[in-house]
Image (cartoon, rainbow, N blue to C red):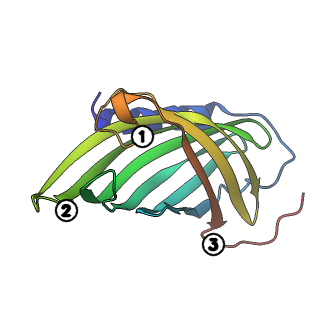
Amino acid sequence: MHLKNIILSTFILFSFVAKAQTTITTNKILDKKPIFVGGGLVLGGGANSFQMGLNPEIIKSFTPYLDGGLAMNIYYELYNSNEFNDIRSRNFRLGIGAFTRIWPIESFFIQVQPEYNYAWIKQKDTKSGQAGSTNFGAESILAGVGYGKRVASGISYFSIMIDLLNNPQSQYNGILNRKEPVFRAGIGFPLRFGPKVTR
């Protein structure tokens, strides 16, 4: 399935749900259908490695039960050679995707996020001096569940997802194309603060 079709299907899905939602609620948080900006930060590493990433997001609340938005992935990882491995690697990945979050109950959501990531990888054998580079793109569809809070002043969340596709070049699939969990946490703030909302 092409990424363009995946993203189009996702937007159609949350547009349909948004129009179909007619439940009257006394919750005033999303009366003005706010737009939030934010995202998450990834940091990691060890004695011979370092990882850093950013996941900026733009989130639109359509109803008290439905959010949609756009997300980016900016990720850099460095692996130095050690006594077990002579390869030094520098990897940079850049991606974009669209997501839908459905909140069936307060504080709990289901998320689907098709995305496309492009990778630039440079490697060098520190023993032989041989070096090489490669670049490639990969489609993914992340799906999973999360826990979060949505109030007038902002959003915070934690989620766990997996890649539903079996693309061997996906950054979310490990050795032998095994599925690996994707943990994400983030925050979002209203793009423009309006009058204070009371509940």
- Residue at 37% over, 52% down: 96
Q: Residues within 10 Å of mark 3 (few under 14, many from 20)?
A: few
Say whether residue 198 is left or right of residue 111. right
Q: Quadrant of the C terminus?
A: bottom right
Q: Label 3 amino acid? A: Arg
Residue with the mark numbered 3: 192
Dot 1, crowdedness within 10 Å: few (<14), some or many (≥20)?
A: many
Circle nearer the viewer, 1 or 2:
2
**Tag in front: 1 or 3:** 1
Q: Which residue is mark 2?
A: 126
Instruction: Identify the element where label 2 is drawn.
Output: loop
Distance, label 1 to label 2, CA atoms, is 27 Å
Q: Secondary structure at mark 1?
A: loop
- Camera-nearest residue between 56 and 135: 135
Counting from the top left corner in percent of width and height, residue 118 is at 27, 51
Task: Tell which of 18 and 109 is nearer to you.
Answer: 109
- Residue 44 versus residue 147 in the image, above or below: below
Give the Cα distance between marks 1 and 3: 34 Å
Compute the Cα span from label 3 to label 2.
51 Å
**Under tag 3, what secondary structure?**
loop
Q: Say which label, 1 or 3, has the lower sequence index.
A: 1
For the N terminus, the image quarter is top left
Across and down, in percent, residue 140 comes to: 38, 37
Q: Which mark is residue 68?
A: none
User: In the displayed structure, would residue 97 be above or below residue 92?
Assistant: above
